[in-house]
Amino acid sequence: MPTWQQLRDVKLNEYTDAADGWGKVSSRSNADKDRVDNEMLARIRKSQEGKAAEAAEADLDQLARNYQYLHTECGLVRTALNGLAAELAAPQKKLKQALEDAENLKFTVHADGSVEYPAGGENLIDKKPIPGGTANGSQFGLFSPTAPPMYQGQGNSPLLNPPGLYPGLGGGNPNQAKAQAVANAIAAAVREANEIDGRYSGVLRHLKADPGLKVENKDLADAAADTKRLQDAAGKYVAASDIPQGRSTEENAKWWNGLTQEQRDEYATLFPASVGALDGIPSTVRDDANRMVFAESKAKYEIELAGIPPEPKPKLVSYGARGGMVYSQKWLDWHHKYEGRQADLKGWLHGMNAIESRLERPAGSGMPEAYLLKFDAEKDDGRVILANGNPDTADHTAVYVPGTKTKLSDIEGDLGRTDALWSQTNGLVPNQNVSTITWFDYNAPNDIPAATLNKYGEEGAPTLRQFMNGMETAQGGPDRSHTTVMGHSYGSTVAGMATQQDRGAGPLADDIIAVGSPGMQVEHASDLGVGKEHVWAMGGDGDDVLVRQGGRLVGHGEGFTIPTDKGFGGNIMASDAKDHGDFWVPGRNSLFNQGAVIAGLHDKVTLD
């Protein structure tokens, strides 16, 4: 427990100076990680091949992982030191005020925090001064049993003889109450400092790395635990409730822009998932925060999966005289405890491996740098928003909304589609910046019966609208980028419903593309708010016909029209897709037409 002398003498600037140093290491580590990912790996992959190149790539991947860990842990140390200094400032100020009061009153503060005060007042019986004494701090109770008598001849308990209650005998030594107040203030300040010291010292003791040069899964999982501990400890300094929730993207951006760089770093380090999901703030910030969440989540899942015991054998055992077979009890126990969780973990990790593969493809490898704008493995079937290229600086931005059966575990196919869209569009406008985004931030229906329901779109539409508003805010306004929203299958239903959200904010995008659409919940293209000349649709053969006509029957096509109907009023693009998932094959007319719309080259689109 700190003493009042230690609290008085502590130089809080030493903590903040140290925090600055740790913050610089954290920032430098993040920059070094980006350099490894986007420069060093790119050069090796571009110029080298073979086993030596593979070994070098593995070493660089490990180095980037190490830097990620340093970025997180050093950032936590910075925030802990800053939080400790900020919180200790209040009790230190209270203590110094109490000591100043004691000095002005000519009281003496002893090493144990007790306060000695002089004689004062007058005993009305014998007219003598009431003796002085010593007041002890409130840690000994509201009134100290060791305090001196209130007046001559009385017992020594202030509780029995409170000052000022016996005016006929004298009002007591006026210095006693003042000294008690000072002693209480000293004790309260020390007690407050002790509580703060205890919270932060526990966290700082955990912020240490194991020896060695290799950051492993257990280290990243420990970093996640460190973050949670500091969240609990530093809640009075940096709170999750400070981060905007349910506000407009302009308000989100205003909050972020109003922070100092140090505050931004602290919120991003301590609450990476919340910052990473905040629409309206820079994509670079969201990417850094979400990569932290991604790395720690992946490490945690891999550890948990490795800890599941193998499936017991045999699964079936003989039962009864006739040799029937039943599940063994050991297998049943394992099945109930582990099988469902094992399947979830394997699915999540399969999808995360696809995301990681894309994140590790550096700029210069045929694709631009990737930006992870949201990640959550465990909400419904997962949540992923991943951009090819920085949308904040893009001349042309396309947001692809996937449809029925979309899951984190199978996200690889959707990522491949936005890769193809980027390559096609970039080829059409090679001297301009293009960003194509996989937007999977809603609970997609898992099967065809579920896809006949509107509830998935009703949930996803406001979220998509918020994302589009946030992208526009981060870009700097509606005219800074040509934007396209593309919905595939049920994703087009979500996109159509999103156009009806927050209509006062302006159009959802500059162009809207519906691919294999069962309907957009509007009767006519002009109802989508972008002008019917900026609404584009295409269909395919095979099962795509069933999807579109099925939508007409179940009512997603308001008024029984779907986007590929001439009566819908939009542009019907020529398509050579052979089935419902065949719209993104390189070299095909279907992909070219989509790229032409995204690039704003409307005159190059082939209409049906």
Image (spheres, rainbow, N blue to C red):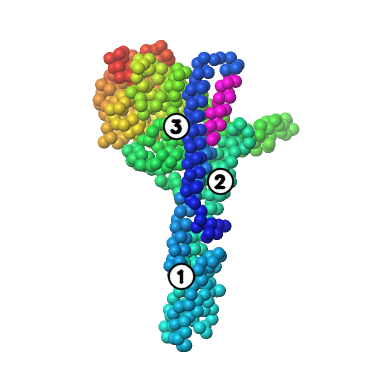
Residues under labels 2 and 3: Cα distance?
27 Å
Task: Count up the numbered dots.
Answer: 3
Look at mark 2 in the image and give the residue it sits on: 204
**Relative to the observer, which residue lies in front, 138 or 365?**
138
Secondary structure of the residue carrying tag 2 is helix
The C terminus sits in image quarter:
top left
The amino acid type found where label 1 is placed reads Lys
Q: Alpha-carbon neighbours of circle 2 within 10 Å: few (<14), some, or many (≥20)? A: some
Please report the residue visible at 54 percent of the width from the left and 66 percent of the height from the top.
110
Precedes in sequence: disc 2 or disc 3: 2
Please report the residue visible at 29 percent of the width from the left and 30 percent of the height from the top.
478
Secondary structure of the residue carrying tag 3 is helix
Precedes in sequence: disc 2 or disc 1: 1
Q: Alpha-carbon neighbours of circle 3 within 10 Å: few (<14), some, or many (≥20)? A: many
Q: Which residues are magenta?
A: 54-70
Residues under labels 1 and 3: Cα distance?
60 Å
What is the x, y in percent for residue 353? 53, 26
Please report the residue visible at 38 percent of the width from the left and 17 percent of the height from the top.
426
Look at mark 1 in the image and give the residue it sits on: 106
